[in-house]
Image (tube, rainbow, N blue to C red):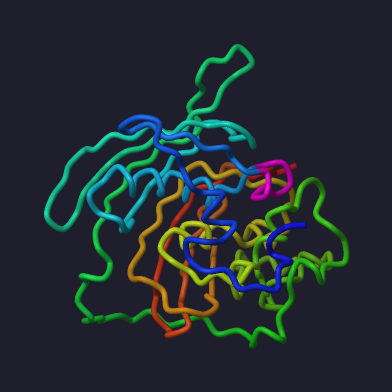
Amino acid sequence: MPEAASATRATIGDSEFDRDTAVNRRAPGVYDIDISAGWTIISAVNGGYLLAVLGRALADALPHADPFTISAHYLTASQPGPAVVRTDVVRTGRTLSTGQASLFQYDDEGKEVERIRALASYGDLDSLPDDVRTSAKPPVFPPMDQCFGPEDGPVPVEGSSAITDRLMLKLDPSTLGWALGAPSGKGEMRSWFGLADGRDADPFSLLLAVDALPPTAFGIGLKGWVPTVELTVHVRCRPAPGPLRVAITTRNLAGGFLEEDAEVWDSADRLVAQSRQLARVRLS
């Protein structure tokens, strides 16, 4: 049974997400991890989960603990199983430190194959000033009890849907036409988001949140895996306890690639994370 089925509310540092993203330092800058199959969808390990793994390694390697911005290129498809993360410190400063990290797995001959390469800047989110000047507004959609999760779908997802057991997703009905065979034609997806075991959000789970909703390509009328080519996340502040709201949009699909812009808002109506990714789609 997944830990999501537990009636006990998990805490930050003591949840399935924390255990499945934890890295073990083998040597300075070298970390081992067993990529969990619990974060797969269709036939792929979720890119946000993998980014959180890299984020954990960089938090240990750098003198600052919180990701401010992280940009990753997904080079080859990751698989559940053993992996190694190698990090390098690029620069350390008083308020920001920058590092790079690569995740490797092994081919049939035991040789390392690079899966992901990331560059990130870290700092201290608690030291940021409270002054906020913004024109951004939280997404407006129905309350959670009027939204729908994967368990409400008419048919199961083909292939693995293990990640859905570990998430609390309640999607805006206006973005769910694709699930009923009537896609809206709009590249939009909106949802309440949390971890199914009740763990509150932190900067590392925000790296997952931006990539955890169904692809906006479904709303355009496409199906199947939408692999991430590049994903950049900006973490703006430490999220307040409670469920998050995630809104993702796509404005342009061309040449078999689309962009997804995500905003993540916390229970205090603060914009806590933003992201943009480039993804490849199957057109036939």
Residue 277: x and y in percent read 48, 52
Looking at this view, is 238 or 22 the one in front?
Answer: 22
- 245 lies left or right of 164: left
- Residue at horizontal 47 percent and vertical 70 percent from the top: 264
- In this view, which residue lies farthest toward the top? 109
Q: Closer to the camera, 28 or 147?
A: 28
* Quadrant of residue 203 within the rendered picture: bottom left
Q: Is residue 41 magenta?
A: yes
Residue 111, image x and y in percent? Answer: 53, 15
Q: Is residue 189 magenta?
A: no
Specify the farthest residue to the right: 154
Circle count: 0
User: On screen, 77 above or below 149?
Assistant: above
For this view, does 161 lie left or right of residue 248?
right
| Residue at x 76%, y 70% (from the top left corner) | 177
Q: Residue at x 20, y 70 (%)?
A: 127
User: Residue at horizontal 17%, vertical 42%?
Assistant: 91
Image quadrant where one finds the N terminus? bottom right
| In front of the other: 123 or 75 | 123
Quarter in which the C terminus is drawn: top right
Q: Which residues are magenta?
A: 37-44
Q: Position of residue 215 (x, y in %)?
A: 64, 57
Q: Nearer the viewer, residue 12 or 35?
A: 12
Quarter of the view holding residue 219: bottom right
